[in-house]
Amino acid sequence: MALAHRLLPSPMDVAGQMWTLATGGRLLPDLGKTLFRAGVAFVLAMAIGTAIGIAMGRLRWLDSLLSGWLVVGLNLPAIVVAIVLYIWLGLTDLALILAVTLNKIPLVATTIREGVRSFAAEFDELGAVFRLSRLRRLRLIFVPQLMPFVLAAARTGLSLIWKIVLVFEVLGSDGGIGYRIAIMFQFFNIAGILAYTASFILVVLAFEYGILRPLERRVGRWRPVRP
Amino acid sequence: MATGPALNIAIADKRFAAQGPAVLAQLHLTIAPGSTVALVGPSGVGKSTLLRLLAGIDTQYSGTITIDGMPAAAAPPPGFVFQDPRLLPWLSAIDNICAVNPATSREAALNALALVGLADVGDLYPHQLSGGMQRRVALARALAVNARLLLLDEPFVSLDRALVSEMQQVFAQLIAAARPTVIFVSHLAEDAARLADRAVLLDGRPARILADLTLPVPRADRDAATVANYRQQIDAAFETVG
């Protein structure tokens, strides 16, 4: 009975553990560390992946040159990238963030490339006929067409980043949610693991409903409302 | 009172690929200020290509096109109406008009919408407008960019009869009010017979001017018999080569 209780803690036990870890333990600093790593990797991967995706979507020769590497990047096991970078750069934040970024860039680049390929040529002609400046074309024609793909890349990429950051923290780091869960695993501390997981999930949900969905609504407010 | 510019067209050769066939060759036209000219011809003859040369977006040809003495590519952008409304779906009607000309204020955009009878739809997105309303917003956009020179590429294509009649009425009122220079492309003799002062008939490959007809009866005074007569003249010119 005691074993069952320890392996299957009640929601109340998990909530209590969360409160204890947040007020007196290392939950908040660990959460901060993980979010910092995920956040930096996310921004870097989105910026670099978007730039590569746009270039590949626009320049056929670059697409031919890089599309093979993109396939390699998409299918290379994330753990391999992390291990190699840990060996080269040591168990540092830089190595971890770089590993996450490198794992995510191909996904972003692929999504953005497909988006750019789907752009309507008619709107390019519209810009040419009315002699719109480059900046105006970018703001009024290019970005609105790209935004749904950026948001799709952000959502799929973010879900990937949350997962691999934790795995890489387990593999080698000096703190963070993954690191702490690895320690709790050694003590079979299920309540602690679930408390950490739940708090992490709360952050993910807050990001989804607090930032991503309102942004999506704003960007897509012109779309017809489906019955 | 002519307010539109004069156009001088002298195209020696236009082809899409260096080794490809010529689409236009030795095409010479002078268009008077404030006139309404219909370019009529079968699909694929090169009418839309000619319109793009006039708009200055395609400069890959030998020859010259001047608008009030300026090369077309350097002249102010024309008020262009595409075959489809081509409104940016993420912008409201007003913003679609302001988008193509930074100098257009919201008030000026509203005025342009009022000219085509759409003063109260400025804040609606294209998907909230009917097909005919979208076409009229596109016309308002063209007016806001350049009300002196209007280039229209098959403006009445794919519209039902009622909508064509509605658009032609709006169009005729605009021409009567401002006397712009208008060049519109159509494959239908009927459009030219109703709206144009002059019909330039194109045919062949490369396109050549088959006939250049003056349609002297003012638009407002054209009855069914006049329109039928003009249409017959245009059809007859095509039949002589058919």
Image (cartoon, rainbow, N blue to C red):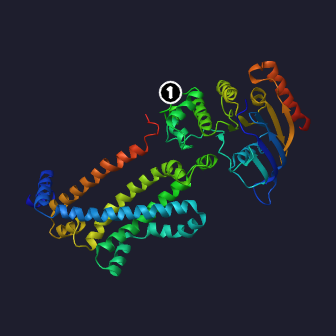
Let me know if residue B205 appears in the view.
no
Q: Residue at x 67, y 33 (%)?
A: B158
Nearer to us in this view, B91 or A223: B91
- Residue A167 horizontal side relative to residue B182, left or right: left
Count of labels in the image? 1
Direction front: furthest residue: B1
For disc 1, the marked residue is B120
| Rendered position, B50 above or below B35 | below
Residue B178 placement (x, y as % from top left): 67, 30
| Rendered position, B24 above or below B241 | below
Residue A26 placement (x, y as % from top left): 15, 64
- Residue A20 horizontal side relative to residue B178, left or right: left
Nearer to us in this view, B6 or A104: B6
Let me know if residue A61 appears in the view.
yes
Residue B170 placement (x, y as % from top left): 65, 26
Residue B18 quadrant? bottom right
> Type of residue at label 1?
Asp
